[in-house]
Amino acid sequence: MPTPQKIRKAVFPAAGMGTRFLPATKATPKEMLCLVDKPLIQYGVEEAVAAGCTEIIIVTGRGKTTMEDHFDRSPELEASLAAKNKTALLEIARSVSRLAKVVTVRQPEPLGLGHAVLMAKELVGNEPFCVLLPDDIVDASIPCMKQMVEAFHEVQSSILASEVVEGPAISAYGCLDCSPHPGNPRLHAVRDLVEKPKFEDAPSPNAIIGRYILTPRIFEMIEGITPGAGGELQLTDAIKALLQHEKVFGFSYQGKRHDAGDKQGFLRATVELALKHPDLGPGFRNWLQEQTF
Ligand code: G1P
């Protein structure tokens, strides 16, 4: 039996143009939109770090360098805060750059999620890794990726976070055909998967959400696929190919997902997370209760 492998690296596909958020994303990366008091991508990075990852690989594109700056040291800001004795703010600024080692790689053309993940092949190397889609914010008492890493240690196979969605909404997701896995009610053995099926063709209401743990063989699978739904190289199709070689599991995580990649979802996430925020929450709740709208 091979030595169980640790998950050390997390890939963040973040090269998209964010057109659903225009005009906000004309010159600002969608991943840098501020949800309550930090940018979207920081939620995912903190989740990956909480799951034990030490290396963050951001797959980025033109005009998106503010993401790198965000996770880097900021000497002028730090000097200015230190000179004014603003120690609490200084600690906030420094803590972001200490989260993890952050490296970037470019996706030169938007050829799909599978292609974005392929861009990280050299940086990931021959080890299992996780993928977090920054649009999906998962609010959970145990961070979603930490739950998945624990499940990975059990099965040593690729794992896709999944949730049940009602009705035709399944057409916006990758969809799993799966059966229960004996011994762990959160794990489901995947039999098949299909990207953005028509409602009537969907094999189940189990949608893939933006958290994956993948074995490195996925890169070879991505290299072998042809454009699928939307004319893009789909990660879902590569995982389907992976099924021919290895087991793949769906995972019913504990927590609540917000689709912050959509204006409505972003607004809802803002209100819910603001209400839960330790400093801002109580005052915001009082203010909301006073409103008549
Ligand atoms: C991507 C994946 C899809 C998955 C979804 C989760 O789709 O291709 O399988 O269900 O993320 O958010 P996208 O939302 O990028 O169209």
Image: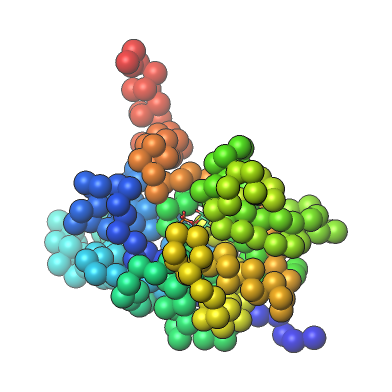
Say left or right for 254 vs 277.
Answer: right
Q: Which of 258 and 39 is in front in this view?
A: 258
Report which quarter residue 249 is drawn in: bottom right
**Residue plotted at (39% across, 37% down):** 264
Work out whether 206 lies above or below 182. Answer: above
Work out whether residue 54 can be spotted. Answer: no
**Residue plotted at (29% across, 70% down):** 61
**Residue plotted at (85% across, 59% down):** 182
Position of the N terminus by quadrant: bottom right
Position in image of residue 123 (x %, y %):
45, 83
Say left or right for 258 vs 236.
Answer: left
Position in image of residue 7 (x %, y %):
58, 74
Disc tally is 0
Work out whether 183 lies above or below 255. Answer: below
Work out whether 116 lies above or below 89. Answer: below
Position of the C terminus by quadrant: top left
**Residue plotted at (61% across, 69% down):** 239
Report which quarter residue 99 is drawn in: bottom left
Q: Which of 244 and 122 is in front in this view?
A: 244
Position in image of residue 261 (x %, y %):
39, 49
Instruction: Give the colour scheme of this rendering.
Output: rainbow
Work out whether residue 218 can be spotted. Answer: yes
Say left or right for 151 vs 118.
Answer: right
Q: Which of 139 and 91 is in front in this view?
A: 139
Position in image of residue 65 (x %, y %):
24, 68
Specify the farthest residue to the top: 292
Say left or right for 83 vs 272.
Answer: left
